Amino acid sequence: MRTRLYRDGRLEKENFPLAEVSDHVSDHRNAIWIDLCRPTPEELTALGDELGLHELAVEDVLADHQRPKADVYANHLFITVYAMRFDGDRFAPAEIDVFVTETALVTVRLDPAVDLDEVVRRWDAAPALAANGVLFLLHGLLDWVVDGQLELVLDLDGRAEDLEEELFEERPADAREVQRKMYELRKTSAHFRKVVMPMRELFGTLLHRDQGILRGSQMMPYYQDVYDHVQRTAELLESLRDLLANMRETRLAQQGFRLNQIMKRLTGWAAIIAVPTAITGFYGQNVPFPGSGQPVGFWMSLVLVSVVSVALYVVFKKNDWL
């Protein structure tokens, strides 16, 4: 567990025990951050009673794999977002549940590998905004989450462009390797869509004028800036989806074209080989024919095989059939 106490925009205490929360939460000059990693149901229930959290929001934390969302309750917000993380080469977004009250920001992490040190550094780098209390803390967290999503979609877009160049190389890479990379990109982008697309609805809830969450706050432009990043991420993800679909169609078209080329060449060579087969077969008859049993018959068949085969080769080559 990590805790922080801001009073009148200044950092007062860090890493104080959870038992002291009740001493600070009622003072409207304070802004408290409480970070919990894999809390027990008893701990969540006790914290919910202390801060007046709705029971449905607490249940959503205990039932993981929630979609990104922002639920508005009478005295607090409940937000679910996903931090970008890779477990080796496997895309594994980490769920972060957030409770936002008037004087407290509670983050609940289900994955210990998620590190919020970067969020703390962002808070420390903008002390002038700390007077905005909990809205300042929430902005730093959401800004970090959205920047991670934007960074990932830019990385996926770069991988897709590199793979697109491989498709048109003179000597294409191993077909199975290209197919595997394309499948992994499509799988990751499809999984990523489930995390990114609901973020627009989440920020729509936060920025909605009727809700009054940010009404009159100087943090409004900062939240709007983060929302612009969300929009850009969603647009890049849509273009990436179209690019991957086009690459898949191109790959299938290339495979069909190469198969047609191979069949065309095989057919041409089969036609050339059929000519000497027919001529030698004709001269191998067991009945008399012009030149039968004489050297002239052998040379006549040899000339016919050579002339017709070369003629067919020239014609096929000229028509790009070989």
Image: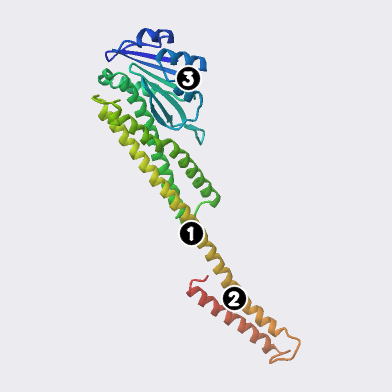
Q: How is the image coloured?
A: rainbow
The three-letter amino acid code for the residue at tag 1 is: Ala
Q: Residues within 10 Å of mark 3 (few under 14, many from 20)?
A: some
Give the foreground label among 3 and 1. 3
Q: How far is mark 2 from mark 1, CA to CA?
A: 29 Å
Q: Which residue is mark 1?
A: 253
Tell me if label 2 and label 1 are in contact, CB under 8 Å. no
Q: Which residue is mark 2?
A: 272
Q: How far is mark 2 from mark 3, CA to CA?
A: 75 Å
Judged from the image, the secondary structure of the residue bearing numbered disc 2 is helix
Q: Is residue 147 left or right of residue 316?
A: left
Q: Position of residue 97 (x, y in %)?
A: 43, 25
Q: Which mark is residue 183?
A: none
Give the position of the N terminus as an image quadrant.
top left
Residue drawn at x 43%, y 8% as measured from the top left:
19
Q: Which residue is mark 3?
A: 37
Towards the viewer: 295 or 236: 236
Mark 2 or mark 1: name the one nearer the start of the chain. 1
Q: Quadrant of residue 169?
A: bottom left
Mark 2 or mark 3: name the one nearer the start of the chain. 3
Mark 3 or mark 1: name the one nearer the start of the chain. 3
Q: Position of residue 299 (x, y in %)?
A: 65, 85
The three-letter amino acid code for the residue at tag 2 is: Ile
Towards the viewer: 84 or 68: 68
